[in-house]
Image (cartoon, grey):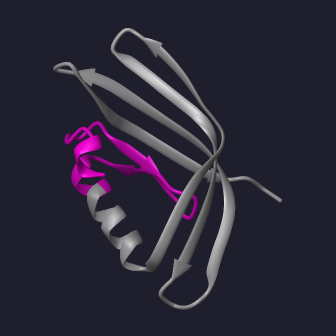
Amino acid sequence: MEPLWAHDDSVMDIEPSDKGITLGWDAVKKHFEAEFRGITELKVTQAEGPHVQVEGDVAWSTGIANAAAKLKSGPALIFPNFETDVFEKRGGVWLLVSHTASRIPK
């Protein structure tokens, strides 16, 4: 995922289990590394969307994705998420600057 992201202090990430916002590339990278250390398997499938809008050098995508994760501690988690991603076109390349995923309540 690293090449997909902008590598500066403006990026942000919020995952379903987060209690706050992770800001800046260094923090986002560390956050993902910690998240992935706790799982042995992750499969994300698009259930709805993506719904993409582009305005100049900014684009955003929304949709619903189903996440299935197997934790190293044993249990499997399966849950749908609302997802929003924001991209900026920098030097002719689209880079992710914001990702938010929130569990859909049952």
Q: Is 22 positioned to the left or the right of 80 in the image?
A: left
Q: Is 22 positioned to the left or the right of 26 in the image?
A: right
Provide residue 64's location: percent of width, then percent of height: 66, 44
Q: Is 13 positioned to the left or the right of 33 in the image?
A: right
Seen at 56% across and 49% down, the residue is 101
Seen at 62% across and 80% down, the residue is 76
Residue range in magenta is: 1-28
Residue 100, placed above or below residue 93: below
Query: Residue 25 or 66: which is nearer the viewer?
Result: 66
Quarter of the rendering containing residue 96: top left
**Magenta stretch holds residue 21:** yes
Residue 63, placed above or below residue 45: above
Residue 28, placed above or below residue 11: below
Q: Please state, as top left, top right, bottom left or bottom right, where the C terminus lies in the image.
A: bottom right
Provide residue 80's location: percent of width, then percent of height: 69, 56
Provide residue 14's location: percent of width, then percent of height: 48, 51
Q: Is 63 positioned to the left or the right of 9 in the image?
A: right
The single residue placed furthest to the top in the displayed view is 56
